[in-house]
Image: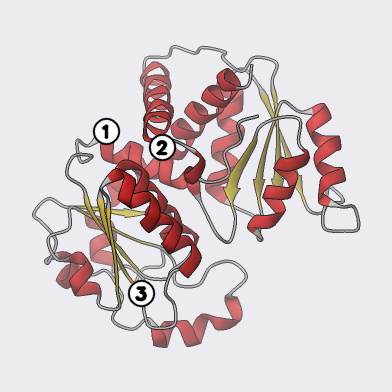
């Protein structure tokens, strides 16, 4: 059974295959060509963490591919309310053809996948956000920015940072990560990424200085400083992350015509300035739309692999 829990489980060839399928589906959609590649298929969508883009993209994607998506919040099912994860996995996977989960602990989705009879997709955990990285890389490919990538991530060492590390390690490009002291990436995940980087020739560097990370970068990206579940830390984080806003001054250090990406939602005046956001808004919202197309590519790929 092939699941999609992290990019670690995929080869470079497989990642690029998923992107290519997504791009082909997107091209067909723009030409009003609809191929019902998931006709009569059902996707169970478990949301322990709410999300605008994840729900809309997966639900719309299944509809456009001829299937149906079920929205299941933690108010609708018993997971986390007494029923073991493995029992929920056995039940839902006996009724659905695929399951997407957006939750907190990564161990929960791993346990679900272990007992699932159908492919499981990670819609986000506290450790990884791999579907977002598919959309991000698809955006780079569409804009001919996927060659000689030098990417700079500025902000919190969170699930997005971890996923950027794994993508860089798998595809073999350079990634520099700038985080405040005390908010660095997970050491174990970093070591895994560095080990993978040796095989691909990727370069992964960490620093506490955003200027060092952004210097001559071709892609600059960031994320909110305060993720869901960290609301009580917001004021403290704003103080600690002072100097980590991606503004015109910081972007001026990157290469000419460098791209700025943001997974959204974006908080102007915090992790990104209003000016930088609006200057790159066309790319950012194309990136957001690509969640739909990249995930359709992923679901079609998973169906083919698990037939």
| Mark 1 to mark 3 CA distance (whole Å) | 29 Å
Q: Earlier in the sequence, mark 2 or mark 3?
A: 3
* Circle 2: element type: helix
Q: What residue is pinned by disc 3?
A: 179
Q: What residue is pinned by disc 1?
A: 142
Position in image of residue 158 (x %, y %): 47, 65
Q: Earlier in the sequence, mark 1 or mark 3?
A: 1
Identity of the residue drawn at 52% across and 24% down: 301
Q: How crowded is mark 3: few (under 14 residues within 10 Å), some or many (20 or more)?
A: many
| Mark 2 to mark 3 CA distance (whole Å) | 27 Å
Q: Is residue 251 left or right of residue 126?
A: left
Position in image of residue 219 (x %, y %): 23, 53
* Quarter of the picture holding the N terminus: top right
Position in image of residue 218 (x %, y %): 17, 52
Q: Which residue lies furthest to the left in this view?
A: 256
Q: In this view, does 16 lie above or below 7?
A: above
Q: Residues within 10 Å of mark 2 (few under 14, many from 20)?
A: many
Q: Can residue 301 be seen in this view?
A: yes
Q: Which residue lies furthest to the right in this view?
A: 82
Q: Do the residues labelled 1 and 2 touch (CB within 8 Å)?
A: yes
Q: What residue is pinned by disc 2?
A: 290
* Circle 1: element type: helix
Identity of the residue drawn at 47% across and 44% down: 7
Q: Nearer the viewer, mark 1 or mark 3?
A: 3
Q: Do the residues labelled 1 and 3 touch (CB within 8 Å)?
A: no
């Amino acid at each position: 059974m092939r699941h999609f829990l992290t990019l670690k489980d995929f080869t470079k060839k497989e990642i690029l295959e998923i992107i290519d399928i997504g791009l082909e589906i997107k091209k067909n959609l723009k030409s009003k060509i609809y191929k019902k590649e998931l006709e009569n298929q059902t996707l169970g969508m478990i949301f322990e963490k709410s999300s605008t883009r994840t729900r809309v993209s997966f639900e719309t994607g299944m509809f456009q591919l001829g299937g149906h998506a079920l929205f299941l919040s933690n108010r609708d099912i018993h997971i986390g309310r007494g029923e073991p994860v493995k029992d929920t996995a056995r039940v839902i996977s006996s009724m659905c053809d695929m399951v997407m989960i957006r939750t907190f602990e990564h161990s929960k989705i791993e346990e679900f996948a272990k007992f699932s009879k159908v492919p499981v997709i990670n819609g986000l955990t506290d450790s990884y956000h791999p579907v977002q990285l598919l959309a991000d890389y698809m955006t780079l490919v569409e804009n001919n920015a996927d060659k000689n990538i030098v990417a700079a991530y500025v902000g919190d060492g969170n699930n997005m940072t971890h996923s950027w590390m794994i993508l860089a390690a798998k595809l073999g490009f350079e990634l520099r990560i700038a985080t405040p002291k005390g908010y660095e990436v997970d050491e174990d995940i970093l070591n895994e990424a560095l080990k993978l980087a040796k095989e691909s020739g990727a370069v992964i560097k960490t620093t506490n200085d955003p200027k060092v990370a952004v210097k001559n970068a071709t892609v600059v990206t960031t994320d909110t400083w305060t993720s869901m579940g960290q609301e009580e830390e917001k004021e403290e984080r704003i103080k600690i992350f002072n100097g980590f806003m991606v503004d015109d001054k910081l972007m001026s250090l990157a290469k000419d015509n460098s791209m700025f990406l943001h997974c959204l939602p974006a908080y102007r005046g915090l992790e990104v300035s209003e000016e930088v956001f609006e200057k790159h808004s066309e790319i950012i919202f194309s990136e957001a739309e690509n969640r739909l197309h990249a995930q359709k590519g992923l679901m079609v790929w998973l169906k083919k692999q698990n037939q």
